[in-house]
Amino acid sequence: AQTVTQSQPEMSVQEAETVTLSCTYDTSESDYYLFWYKQPPSRQMILVIRQEAYKQQNATENRFSVNFQKAAKSFSLKISDSQLGDAAMYFCAYRLYSGGSNYKLTFGKGTLLTVNP
Amino acid sequence: NAGVTQTPKFQVLKTGQSMTLQCAQDMNHEYMSWYRQDPGMGLRLIHYSVGAGITDQGEVPNGYNVSRSTTEDFPLRLLSAAPSQTSVYFCASSSQASGSTKNIQYFGAGTRLSVL
């Protein structure tokens, strides 16, 4: 079974600084997707960024980027120029590449990010 | 653009009561699922469906029933609520069609359930 581990229950960052959230996963598959979801106090789950395992290039979305190390099974999220609105719980998630029942997402336990003004 | 709609947003039950959490999506997505979120546990899959008439169990299915009679709706039923089912419940949907949005799961706003 696939597992996702987020080893940092809490992180903090100063506004305008950069922070990196860690995620490791365990799988025997070669084709899969990885995601970072943000959950602000409103509780809404918001997709931040996704990475296809077959792509070597790291995904980027504005101030958010990932460092995807397939051999090490590592998928960290870097937030640059942190803003107060980035404060939230962040979840790393995994799912297999093919469809059918493989649309299931496996989540890590989350990292609570605090942004200090 | 309604997306994924969950009702109710909050609910308090007594032990042994039954209720149905509603989930509807208007994106014609084939795949729908229910997760529960508990402190320090992340989100865990309860049940999922890959199309009308097809459902299957996830990681934590005990105490919950589902059915999928239409593409749009995927209700979650608690037949006899227990305090251990106190949690936040999320419904999600995803398309199996090709395209850039195929792999994205869209989440509802969640239902906070307390069982006393």
Image: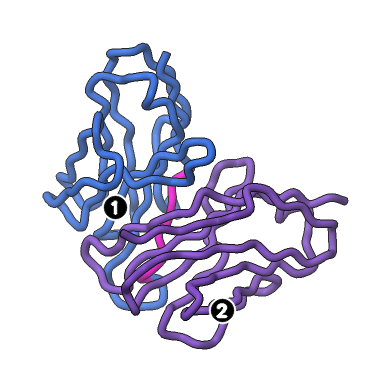
Give percent across and percent down for residue A93: 46, 60
**Residue at the image position 62 percent from the left and 67 percent from the top:** A77
Q: Which residues are magenta?
A: B102-109
Q: Is residue B71 above or below residue A49?
A: above
| Label 1 crowd (10 A; few <14 / some 14-19 / many >=20) | many
Measured in 3D between alpha carbons, the distance from the residue under mark 1 to the one under mark 2, in whole angstroms, is: 26 Å
Q: Position of residue A3 (x, y in %)?
A: 40, 58
In the image, residue B39 sits, relative to residue B30, either above or below, namely above
Q: Nearer the viewer, mark 1 or mark 2?
A: 2
| Secondary structure, magenta segment, majority class | loop
Residue A22: which quarter of the image? bottom right
- Residue at x 71% of width, y 55% of height: A86
Q: Quadrant of residue B85?
A: top left
Q: Chain of mark 1?
A: B
Residue name at image x 55 percent, y 68 percent:
A49
Q: Is A60 in front, or is B101?
A: A60
Q: Position of residue B53 (x, y in %)?
A: 11, 49
The residue singled out by tag 2 in the image is: A59
Q: Which chain has been coloured blue in this picture?
A: B
Please, what is the three-letter code of the amino acid marked with disc 2? Ala
Q: Secondary structure at mark 1?
A: strand
| SS assignment at label 2 | loop
Q: Chain A is which colour?
A: purple
Name the image quarter holding the N terminus of chain B.
bottom left
Residue ID for mark 1: B32
